[in-house]
Image (spheres, rainbow, N blue to C red):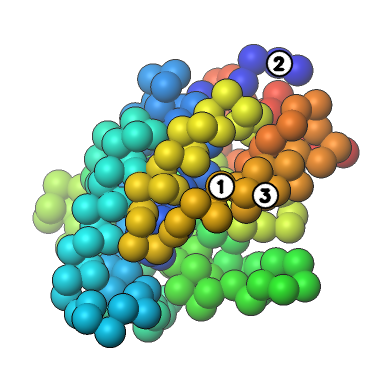
């Protein structure tokens, strides 16, 4: 296997606090540890995810933002954008696409990781959250063509946000992965980052992480993986799906 590709900069766009840790924490830790500048964009405030009758939506939003910052710090994430959309009600609107275009142009990532919006179900026991699918749809449309095209959302030009071409979209939460990252060296960091979300997760998540990593690595020359469906829009130096452990 060739030397693994490390982007100079990466952005992770997800719906909720803790989504990124499930989706790509091992990859983020590997990239950040090798010098990549990673930005997290969390679209909703996560204010619906509690069964505690004493918890209020406003308090929960504060708690989950703090947990997300702590989890990202474990992985080496440099920048955070919390967009504050209401949890559970996310829709793929032009307003959301504009807001995501803004952050893509501001940070100018080489790679963006997001959810695969085409994945309605995963396996036979998981219905993908509608916020996940909406966030993936909006992220992809913000990347292409909105962030690229100067005359799309022209008000962004008045904010000195020039067009930007993202080299690749890496979609997680997919059953159509064509690129697999060996996360064995960063598995412990992924576990620690997930446990930094105590309002949502307990120790039981650790076994799930092992099972998920082994399942993603099936057929690969390593034990634990995160799988992505990579859409290559531009060709940065040093990347090919084969170099990462492409699909057979």
Q: Residue at left 28%, top 52%?
A: 67
Q: Is residue 98 left or right of residue 128?
A: left
Secondary element type, mark 2: loop
Q: Residue at left 58%, top 67%?
A: 117
Closer-to-camera residue (229/98): 229
Q: Residue at left 32%, top 69%?
A: 46
Closer-to-camera residue (207/225): 207
Q: Nearer the viewer, mark 2 or mark 1?
A: 1
Inter-mark Cα distance, 3 to 2: 25 Å
Would you name the residue on which mark 1 appears? 206
Residue 202 in percent (x, y) is at 45, 56
Q: Nearer the viewer, mark 3 or mark 2?
A: 3
Would you name the residue on which mark 3 appears? 212
Q: Residue at left 75%, top 47%?
A: 215
Q: Residues within 10 Å of mark 3 (few under 14, many from 20)?
A: some
Q: Quadrant of the C terminus?
A: top right
Q: Quadrant of residue 214?
A: top right
Q: Which mark is residue 2?
A: 2
Q: Say if mark 3 contacts mark 1, CB within 8 Å.
A: no
Q: Quadrant of residue 185?
A: top right
Closer-to-camera residue (173/198): 198
Rendered view: 207 above or below 2: below
């Amino acid at each position: 296997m060739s030397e693994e590709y490390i982007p100079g900069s990466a952005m992770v766009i997800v719906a909720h606090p803790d989504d990124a840790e499930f989706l790509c924490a091992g990859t983020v830790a590997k990239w950040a540890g090798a010098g990549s500048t990673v930005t997290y964009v969390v679209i909703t405030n996560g204010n619906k995810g509690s069964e505690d009758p004493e918890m209020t939506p406003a308090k929960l939003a504060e708690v989950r933002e703090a947990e997300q910052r702590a989890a990202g710090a474990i992985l080496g994430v440099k920048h955070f954008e919390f967009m504050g959309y209401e949890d559970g009600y996310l829709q793929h609107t032009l307003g959301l696409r504009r807001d995501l275009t803004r952050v893509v142009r501001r940070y100018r990532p080489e790679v963006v990781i997001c959810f695969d919006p085409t994945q309605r179900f995963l396996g036979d026991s998981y219905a993908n959250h509608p916020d996940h699918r909406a966030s993936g749809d909006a992220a992809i449309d913000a990347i292409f063509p909105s962030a690229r095209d100067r005359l799309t959302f022209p008000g962004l030009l008045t904010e000195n946000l020039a067009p930007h071409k993202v080299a690749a979209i890496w979609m997680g939460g997919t059953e159509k992965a064509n690129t697999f990252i060996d996360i064995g060296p960063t598995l412990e960091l992924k576990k620690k980052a997930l446990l930094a979300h105590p309002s949502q997760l307990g120790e039981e998540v650790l076994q799930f992480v092992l099972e998920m990593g082994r399942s993603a690595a099936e057929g690969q020359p390593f034990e634990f993986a995160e799988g992505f469906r990579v859409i290559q829009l531009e060709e940065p130096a040093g990347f090919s799906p084969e170099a990462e452990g492409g699909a057979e």
